[in-house]
Amino acid sequence: SAMHGGDMLLPAVHTCSCALAWLRQHRRVVDSPLAPPGGCEGGRGRGFTVRRLSRASDASLYGRCLGLRASLLWPRESPPPSAADYDTADGEATFFAAVRCTGQGGEEEAELLGTAMLHDGRLRQVVAVPAARGQGVGAALVSAAAEAARAEGRDELSVGAWATSETFYSRCGFEPDSEPYESNGMSCRRLRLRLAQAGA
């Protein structure tokens, strides 16, 4: 279906740190909303912060995330999906936006660096802008989604990864959970990340 091909981080996004290790070291940047008008805070050490949102709670930032997905992910699929293909999932999903604050305003002053979505235990639509690759944006988005999935009581996080993105997810601790398959013209494989629960 059109839903599979866009679950992946673009292959040029690489990081050597495991996403969960990164989370432990930089926990303050996860689930940290943008500061109200008057300043931007969070993630100063990395130069960006990760914001958790939903389509209903933050229509403006969601719209920008949707535009990023449509411009960088969807054209790689054959046939390319549309916003209508994701309408139901987007309405139910939790989204994560990596942003860099560029001024003293609110979210309109935040530069969008990347986005990801969590839907029913699946990590989907992970993408970073070309200029932000290599800065840990992808790992931070995976970390935020993993923390959210753990908070939901899930013991694993899955992703349908393009073959060109498997190395990135492997570095984040994901393991193969299927044989390779083709979806919308892309070679894919289902991967999963085991999530340790508190007290386990």
Image (spheres, rainbow, N blue to C red):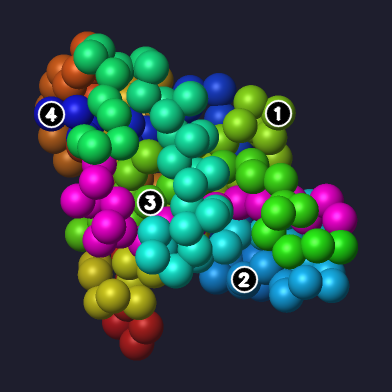
Give residue 194's quadrant in the image.
Answer: bottom left
**Disc with the residue nearer the chain's start (1 vs 3):** 3
Judge by depth and name the residue closer to the eye, 5 or 101.
101
Q: Which mark is residue 33?
A: 2
Q: Mark 2 or 4 closer to N-term?
A: 4
**Is 6 on the left or on the right of 41, as rendered?**
left
**Numbered range of the magenta stretch:** 86-103
Residue 98 x %, y %? 60, 51
Q: Cβ–Cβ below 8 Å for labels 1 and 3?
A: no
Q: In terms of secondary structure, where does tag 3 sit?
A: strand
Residue type at mark 3 is Met
Relative to 149, 178 lies left or right: left
Q: Residue at x 55, y 70 (%)?
A: 31
Report the mark closest to the observer, 2 or 1: 2
Tag of residue 131: 1
The residue under the point 56% across, 30% down is: 13
Report the residue at 56% width, 36% height from top. 128
For mark 4, what is the residue? 1
Q: Residue 90 lies in magenta, yes or no?
A: yes
Please give left or right for residue 149 compared with residue 52 in the image: left
Report crowding for label 1: few under 14, some 14 to 19, many 20 or more residues within 10 A (C-alpha).
few
Of the numbered discs 3 and 4, the one sitting upstream in the chain is 4
Tag 4: residue type?
Answer: Ser
How far apart are the two marked residues, 2 and 4, measured between alpha carbons? 33 Å
Give the residue pinned by disc 3: 117
Above or below 7: residue 173: below
Q: CA distance from mark 2 to mark 1?
A: 23 Å
- Of the image marks 4 and 1, the number of the one nearer the N terminus: 4
Q: Nearer the viewer, residue 102 or 167?
A: 102
Q: Residues within 10 Å of mark 4 (few under 14, many from 20)?
A: few
Task: Left or right? Give the position of 134 relative to 125.
Answer: right
